[in-house]
Image (cartoon, rainbow, N blue to C red):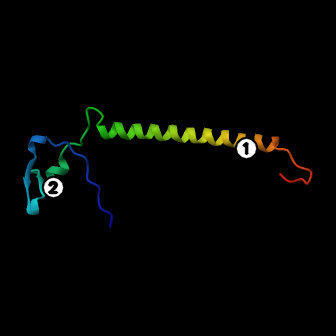
Amino acid sequence: MQQERPAEVAIPFASLSFTTGAKGMRVVALPLSKEGLQAAPRFQPTEKTVYMRAKKRAGEIGQRASDKAGELRDKAAKKIDDMRSERPVNKLGLL
């Protein structure tokens, strides 16, 4: 059975309560029922979060790295071909 992924909902920070539970664990509670949570509006960020900006930037950096790797691969292949065509062959036909 596949578990349903929780939705990202908009919850006012002031409605959360923070306490310490058993073994010193932090507990964050929200006075909502399951139905109330399901009816809560979906979270729509008003600006990009640090995570969103970092994820976008990481994708851009990854793409640039991939492009550069392809460029270097092509340059290396060309250089190898150039070196092979310039290498003299001795009288025995060995390289």
What secondary structure is marked by label 1?
A: helix
Q: Amino acid at mark 1?
A: Ile
- 94, above or below 86, in the image: below
**Label 2 crowd bin: few (<14), some (14–19), many (20+), radius 10 Å:** few
- Of residues 73 and 67, the one nearer the viewer is 73
- Can you say which quadrant of the picture contains the N terminus? bottom left
Q: Residue at x 52, y 40 (%)?
A: 65
**Label 1 crowd bin: few (<14), some (14–19), many (20+), radius 10 Å:** few
How many marks on residues? 2
Q: Earlier in the sequence, mark 2 or mark 1?
A: 2
Point out residue 49 in the picture as x, y percentages from the top left corner. 28, 37
Point out residue 33 in the picture as x, y percentages from the top left corner. 12, 54
Question: Is residue 19 shown left or right of residue 34?
Answer: left
Q: Residue at x 57, y 42 (%)?
A: 69
- Which residue is label 2 attached to? 34
Q: Residue at x 63, y 43 (%)?
A: 73
- 95, above or below 78, in the image: below
- Which residue is label 1 attached to? 80
Q: Amino acid at mark 2?
A: Lys
Which is closer to the viewer, label 2 or label 1?
A: 1
What secondary structure is marked by label 2?
A: helix
